[in-house]
Amino acid sequence: MIGLGVESTAHTFSCAILEKKGKQGKILSDVRKIYRPPEGEGIHPREASRHHVENSAIVLSECLQEAGVTIKDLDIVSYAAGPGLGPCLRVGAVVARSLASYYNIPIYPVNHAIGHIELGKLLTGAKNPLVLLVSGGHTMLLAFLNKQWRVFGETLDITLGQLLDQFGRSLGFASPCGKNIEDLALSTSNYVLLPYSVKGNDVSFSGLLSATKSIVQKSKADACFSLQETAFAMISETVERALSFTRKKELLVVGGVAANKRLSEMLQDVCKRHGCKFFVAPQKYAGDCGSQICWTGLLESQVKKGVSLEETFVTQSWRLDSVKVDY
Amino acid sequence: MKLLKKGAEADIYLTRWDNLPAILKVRKAKRYRNPILDAKIRKQRTIKESQIISEVKSYGIPTPLVYYVNLKKSSITMQEIPGKPVHDLPDSKIIELSTEIGRLVGMMHKNGIMHGDLTTSNFILYKNKVYVIDFGLSQKTIKPEDHAVDLRLIKEILNSAHAKIMESTWKNFLLGYKSVVGPTNYAKITNLVSVIESRGRYATVV
Ligand SMILES: Nc1ncnc2c1ncn2[C@@H]1O[C@H](COP(=O)(O)OP(=O)(O)O)[C@@H](O)[C@H]1O
Ligand SMILES: [Mg+2]
C-alpha cells in the first residue's frame, strides 16, 4: 500500500509518501514548508493559509518526485481534518479532495493528534505506552484503553508550546521559539523561583507565563532557564503521577516540544524511578509533518473504506479522545 | 524497612511505630527538579499533608493518624490502613462506593478543604469504611473554582481509568456530593466544571 498524507493544521504545510507492508511502514518522502510569522508576532491564520496555498503545489510535486512515485501509484490519500486552524485545515483538505476526486483515490480524514502518536509508535517501536503529547496545540497525557485514547492529564489553560512561544515572542523571537529559549537557557544555571502549578494530573501554565515575563528585565537567560526548569518539572511530575497510576511500563513523547533536550533528560530520570522504558519521536518527525497523517490513514485503511467526498470535513476542535480506533 | 509502593510522588515503606505496623511516606529529592524548587515543594507538601490529614478528621473524614513528621527528610510516619485502594477493587464495588466517595469529597469542600489529588488510588477501603489519603496537594479554600478543579480531576480519572463504568460511577459520585453540599452549591460547582472542560476542549491551536 502506498499513501499520501497532507498536513496543514497550523504553521506547517507538508506532504509525505509512505509505503505500508503488513505492520511495517517506510517513509519514502516527507517535504515541508513552514510559515514563519514576523518576529515577535503570533501565527495569523489567514496569512498562514495563504502561505500554504502558495506552497502546496511545489510541496506536493517535490514529495512525489523524491519518493519516485506518481499520483497513479497512490492507493489512498489522507489529510489532517483537525484539530487546527480552520483556514489552514481547509487548504490541506482541498488538496486531498482534488486528488481524490480527479484520480478516484480513496480519501481518509485523520485526527492530527492521533497522527503524532501513531507515527511515534511506528518510529520508536513503543508497544503500549503512556503518551506525552506536547506541542503548540496540545499538552496531554494519554493511554489506550477500550479502543480509545483516554486522557489521564492535560493543561487547564495554555499548552506547553504556547507557553514557550508566547514567552519567546515577548523577547522578540520569531515563533516557534522553543529552540531559541532552549539555547539561551544553556548559558546559565541561575534559578529564580517561579509559580509551580500541578493540580493532580493536570497543569496550569498561565500564572507561570506572566511571572516569567516579570523577571525578564534582570536577565533574559535566567528567565529562559527558570521557565524551562519550572514548566518541565511540572510536566515531569504529572508524567510520574500518570505512570504510577496507570502502571504503564513505556513512555512515548511526541509533538514539537519533544525535540527539547532538557525535557527529555528530565523525563528519562522519571522513567528510571518507575522502571519504565523511554521513547521519544526522532527530532525530524516529532513536530508536524505529512508522515503522521499518511501513516494513520494507512492504518485506518486496514479496517475502513475511504469516506465519500461529502464527508471530507474539517473540525477545528476535534478531540482525539472522541475518536474510535479499530485497527 | 520494606518498600511497599512507589506512589505518584513519594516512596511508601512499611515500618513500625510503637510496635504497631505503620507507613513511612518519604518525599525523596527528585534529581530532575532544580534543587531549590525541589526542596521547596517537598517541604511545603509535607507540612500541608500532615496538617490537613489531621484537620479533616474533625469533619468526620476517615484518614490515617499521623504519628511523626520529619521535615528535614520530608517524611511522615502514619497509621497503616491495611485495606485496598479503590482503584484495585472490582467494578461493581467501585460503582457502589462512588456515592460514599462523593459524600466524603462534599464534606471536605463544605469545610473549606480542596483535596487536590482525587484519584481512585487515594481512597482505601478497609473494614467497610472508605479512608482518604494523600493530602500533599490539598489546600484550604472555599473558592468554588478550586472545588470544581477537584471534581474535574476525579471525573477525568473515571473517564479514563474506569471508562467502562464512567456513567454509573460519576452519577453516584454526584449523588453523594450533592447530598452534602446542597443543591445550590452543587449547581454552581458542576457548572464551573463544564467551564473548565470547555476551556481545554476549545483551546485555540496556535
Ligand atoms: N496510610 C496508608 N495505609 C496504607 N496504604 C497506604 C497508606 N498511605 C499510602 N498507602 C499506599 O501507598 C500509595 C501511595 O501513597 P500516597 O500517599 O498516595 O503517595 P503519593 O503522593 O506518592 O501518591 C497509596 O496509593 C496506597 O496504596
Ligand atoms: Mg497517591
Image (spheres, coloured by chain):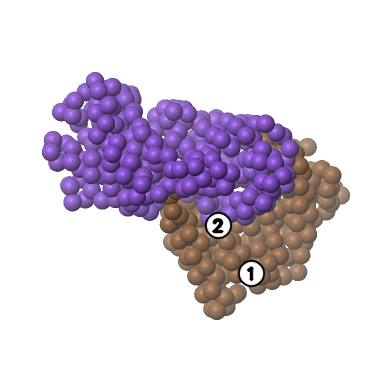
Chain colours: A purple, B brown
Quarter holding residue A223: top right
Q: Amino acid at mark 1?
A: Lys
Sequence-wise, the earlier of marks 1 and 2 is 1
Q: Chain of mark 2?
A: B
For label 2, the SS is helix
**Along the horizontal axis of the image, is B118 left or right of A252?**
right
Which quarter of the rendered picture does the N terminus of chain B lie within?
Answer: top right
Residue A310 location in percent, x, y? 18, 51
**In the picture provided, is B116 more to the left or to the right than B161?**
right
For the residue pair B112 and A137, the one nearer the viewer reads as A137
Q: Give whichever of A288, B73 is nearer the camera.
A: A288
Q: Is label 2's Cβ within 8 Å of ligand 2?
A: no
Q: Which disc number belongs to residue A210?
A: none
**Picture residue at 33% right of the left edge, 35% below the top:** A14
Badge count: 2
Check disc 1: other Cα within 10 Å, few if <14, some if 14-19, many if 20+.
few
Identity, as a three-letter code, of the amino acid under mark 2: Leu
Mark number for residue B143? Answer: 1
Q: Which of the numbered marks, if any, corresponds to residue B153? A: 2
Nearer the observer: mark 1 or 2; the answer is 1
